[in-house]
Amino acid sequence: MRFQLSPEQRQFAATLHELLGGADTAAAARAWAAGEHERGLKLWRALADVGVFALLVSEDYGGLGAGPVDLVVACEALGYHAVPGPLVESAAVAPALLTGHRLTSLAEGDLVATVVAPPEVPLALDADVAGVVLDLTGALLTGAGAEPVRSIDPPRRLFRVPAAAGVSSGVAFDRGVLAVSAQLLGAGQWLLDTSVAYAKQRKQYGRAIGEYQAIKHLLADVATRLELARPLVRGAAVAAVAGETFARDVSAAKVLAGDAALLAARTALQVHGAIGYTAEHDLGLRLTKVRALAGAWGTGSFHRARVLR
């Protein structure tokens, strides 16, 4: 089994980081949280132009016909830069549920999709922006009259959609779990990178705090946990391609990626000190994002139970 990315996949990741690194995604996320979608939708169209929403769409409908490993590459970058919107639902889940011209619109970025899959995904993300709201049977639900629900992560705008049906299983569900796992990995990596950079410049008692062993050990623990989670996420993507034991592997990936990202969040807050609590610092966007994603598309308890079964 090969876990190393191909040159094309590494180039795709570099393209996404270059695009998102210069796009001020933090400002887009804050505007999205306030219900102002213009910046976020402009970013959505830019992501569509580089093929993010076409990855899992068949070439017959204008897609790229790529695979789950490419999806993981994209979602790691999206998680790293805290891009707002129903990315998992549109890029990972909807391609397995939609048919015909809607698939073409999805691949081109003209259609924004969101999904509900109770009991594990009981609320629709950004139902007020989505062109279609789906359940895991592929049924089209109406977003009209959807009731907003307060989210721990303000850019994740949640809505209670009436008459939602579905079960938390199947290929579409597992693709959602895989994509969220990759997002968690990306967010955790941003938290580690930012904490390392801060520890090198923040000084106490005349020394950079990164020179103290206690800080080194904290950051080393995070790096280790992320590196242990990464092959499980990529391995689950490979298993999805092979069609073997995908549910077990993707649940294991979600557990480890979630635990690693939560550790990265706690450590980042500890390293940054009081500044990490301020809403103005971009750290806050990742802290709330990681907390929300850790329970999205199945809690740790749910996925541990799936692995056990």
Image (cartoon, rainbow, N blue to C red):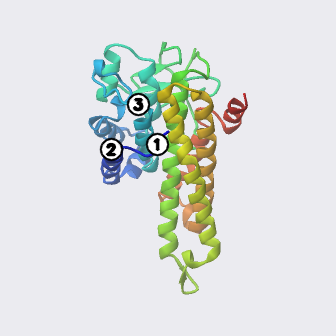
Tag 1 or tag 3, which sits nearer the N-term? 1
Q: Amino acid at mark 3?
A: Gly
Tag 1: Cα neighbours inside 10 Å, few (<14), some, or many (≥20)? some
In the picture, residue 61 is in which quadrant?
top left
Residue 89 has which mark? none
Confirm whether residue 186 shows in the render: yes
Q: Which mark is residue 67?
A: 3
| Labels 2, 1: front one | 2
Left or right placement of residue 132 versus residue 264 in this view: left
Q: Residue under label 2, please give it.
A: 12
User: Looking at the picture, how far across and down is residue 208, in whole percent?
Assistant: 53, 79
* Drawn side of residue 95 relative to residue 121, left or right: left
Note whether 138 is above or below 265 in the view shown: above
Which of the marked residues, 2 or 3, is nearer the chain's N terminus?
2
Circle 3: is it few (<14), some (14-19), or many (20+) Cα within 10 Å? some
Q: The disc labelled 2 sits on which kind of residue?
A: Phe
Q: In this picture, is 85 found above or below 122?
A: below
Does residue 124 appear in this view? no
- Callout 2 touching callout 3 (CB < 8 Å): no
Q: Residues within 10 Å of mark 2 (few under 14, many from 20)?
A: some
* Quarter where residue 165 is shown: top right
Secondary structure under the numbered disc 2 in the rendered image: helix
Q: Position of residue 23 (x, y in %)?
A: 32, 50
User: In the image, which disc is placed on residue 33?
Assistant: 1
Q: CA distance from mark 3 to mark 1?
A: 31 Å
